Image (cartoon, rainbow, N blue to C red):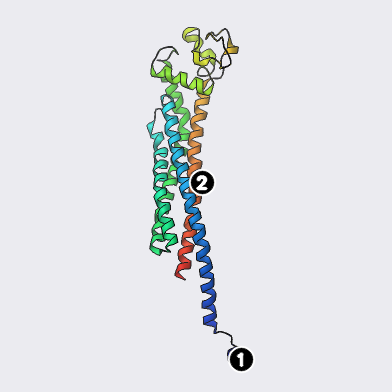
Amino acid sequence: MEKAAMWGAPPAGRWGSAVLSAMGQWGITSLKTVLVFLNLIFWGAAGILCYVGAYVFITYDNYDHFFEDVYTLIPAVVIIAVGALLFVIGLIGCCATIWESCCGLTTFVIILLLVFVTEVVVVDLGYVYRAKVQSEVDHSIQKGCKTSNGTNPGAASRATDYVQRQLHCCGIHNYSDWETKNQSVPLSCCRETASNCNSSLASPSDLYTEGYEALVVKKLQEIMTHVIWAALAFAAIQLLVMLCACLHRAVQEE
């Protein structure tokens, strides 16, 4: 001890405190930068979540005749609500990080944890309703077939025409499904490249031949998949933000 003091070496306790102080300052600066950056990503991701939710609503409105269970919209409603909430959460996170508020960071992490649990529920609901798409579409199509002949102005015919134009298809399974109806097909079955299409079954080259049942199921399942992946991706970002916030708070307490 005397030799160390003679050469001017600092006491062990003071040296340890200096190292901890230096590491703490570096950690705070780095984590503040990361947290602010991640909160900016939050705002962008929140906008994406709102877009995905709105896309689900718009698509459901176009395909609601084939999918009558309105509870399918629950994941979309939750995603839009979470997206809107995250704009506010991002602001709280930025303020708590810049002002180095331990209380603010704790509140930030707790809210994020609650949102994370909500997103887990969204993923579960997404899987549940994705599995129900096939049976729901089958039921709705069988019900619609009784009222739709492709020519009347009813909701069933309008929905069928919309789907056939958008998905480039004709009939439930194929274009020949219309044969038992009126020996012709709706104009929505005509290919865009067929200039002289007269809706006749005798000219299949002018018609879309694939049925809409499989395509509608595929489209709706893709939508639910988008919801699931959006929730999973954002949940991963939240885990990273919560980890950084906890580390930041721990370094502050040092």
Q: Nearer the viewer, residue 131 or 47?
A: 47
Where disc 1 sits, the SS reads helix
- Say the numbered circle drawn on residue 90: none
Residue 123 appears in view: no
Image point (49%, 61%), residue name: 32
Q: Is residue 21 above or below residue 157?
A: below
Q: Is residue 59 above or below residue 211?
A: below
Q: Please tell me how crowded label 2 is: few (under 14), some (14-19), or many (20+) other residues with Cα within 10 Å.
A: few
- Percent across and percent down for residue 128 are 45, 37
Amino acid on which the number 1 mark rests in the picture? Lys
The CA span between labels 2 and 1 is 59 Å
- Percent across and percent down for residue 215 are 52, 25
- Percent across and percent down for residue 115 are 41, 49
Q: Nearer the viewer, mark 2 or mark 1?
A: 1
Tell whether label 1 touches label 2 (CB within 8 Å): no
Residue under pointer 1: 3
Residue 32 appears in view: yes
- Percent across and percent down for residue 13 are 52, 81
Q: Is residue 39 above or below residue 173?
A: below
Q: Nearer the viewer, residue 107 or 172?
A: 107
Q: Nearer the viewer, residue 179 or 244?
A: 244
Q: Nearer the viewer, residue 176 or 57?
A: 57
Q: Is residue 128 above or below residue 177?
A: below
Label whose residue precedes the other's in the sequence (2 or 1):
1
Where disc 2 sits, the SS reads helix
Amino acid on which the number 2 mark rests in the picture? Ala
Image point (50%, 32%), residue name: 221
Q: Quadrant of residue 7?
A: bottom right
Residue under pointer 2: 233
